[in-house]
Amino acid sequence: MSKPRRSGGSWRDRQERDPYVQRARRDGWRSRAVYKLEQIDQKERFVRPDMVCVDLGAAPGSWSQFVSRKLKGRARIVAVDLLSMDALPEVEFIQGDFEDDGIFEQMLQAVGSGGADLVMSDMAPNITGIKGVDQPRSMNLVDLALDMARKVLKPGGNFVCKVFQGEGFDAFVVDARRSFERVKVMKPKASRAGSREVYLVARNYQL
């Protein structure tokens, strides 16, 4: 799933000045979003050797890249996106809509019968700037991600996803708590201060 896109020189200028954008280029990461996952993992430590990880809406691939690089090959990573994505070590990429039955079956085969240890999602809709349109679209995506997590996680697995605060947010957190032992909401330093985005981290999936 594509990340938000905005037109206009001011956004591009801000991107060029952004220290995380500059740092990502210097360090060879595919996007600045990698630092959000890194900062969350520094506190939660859910990226562990020999895990099976599903990355929803993966393109351009910085979250899968982080897991692959941190675990140095000791992971099986299944990345899914509507958009194409350049290959990464230890990452099996499936292009398509994970709601599609055929794509879902490919995911299940790639994950294996044991299930996933981690489902992660940095998905966001293409932003229109109209709150009444953008918020329902974003909440639909996180609902889909949570539903997918419930389908593929093994007992004790973890789930992390981007959520935009607004209508439907509180109900989503309550829904997640029905399936996980511990749920918290985090805003990593790499997330822009003016953005409504936060990250839901759900630990220890309960069937």
Image (cartoon, grey):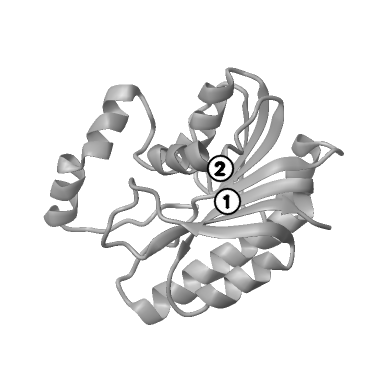
* Residue 92, image quadrant: top right
**156 left or right of 78?**
right
Q: Residue at x 53, y 26 (%)?
A: 87
Q: Residue at x 44, y 74 (%)?
A: 135
Q: Position of residue 204 (x, y in %)?
A: 73, 50
Q: Tell me the residue that label 1 is attached to.
A: 160
Q: Position of residue 58 (x, y in %)?
A: 52, 43
Q: Residue lying furthest right in this view? A: 113
Q: Examine the rendering and report whether any part of residue 61 can be seen.
A: no
Ranked by sequence position, the earlier of labels 1 and 2 is 2
Query: Mark 1 packing: few (<14 Cα in 10 Å), some, or many (20+)?
Result: many
Q: Nearer the viewer, mark 1 or mark 2?
A: 2
**Frontmost residue, 107 versus 22:** 22
How far apart are the alpha carbons under marks 1 and 2?
Answer: 10 Å
Q: Secondary structure at mark 2?
A: helix
The reply to whether the C-beta atoms of the residues labelled 1 and 2 are less than 8 Å apart is yes
Q: Position of residue 70 (x, y in %)?
A: 53, 24
Amino acid found under the numbered disc labelled 2 = Glu
133 w.r.t. 112: above or below: below
**Frontmost residue, 16 versus 171:** 171
Figure disc tally: 2
Q: Position of residue 102 (x, y in %)?
A: 75, 50
Amino acid found under the numbered disc labelled 1 = Val
Q: Tell me the residue that label 2 is attached to.
A: 44
Q: Quadrant of the C terminus?
A: bottom right
45 w.r.t. 198: above or below: above
Q: Residue lying furthest top in this view? A: 72
**Frontmost residue, 115 versus 180:** 180
43 w.r.t. 25: above or below: below
Q: Residue at x 27, y 38 (%)?
A: 20
**13 left or right of 156?**
left
Q: Examine the rendering and report whether any part of residue 29 can be seen.
A: yes
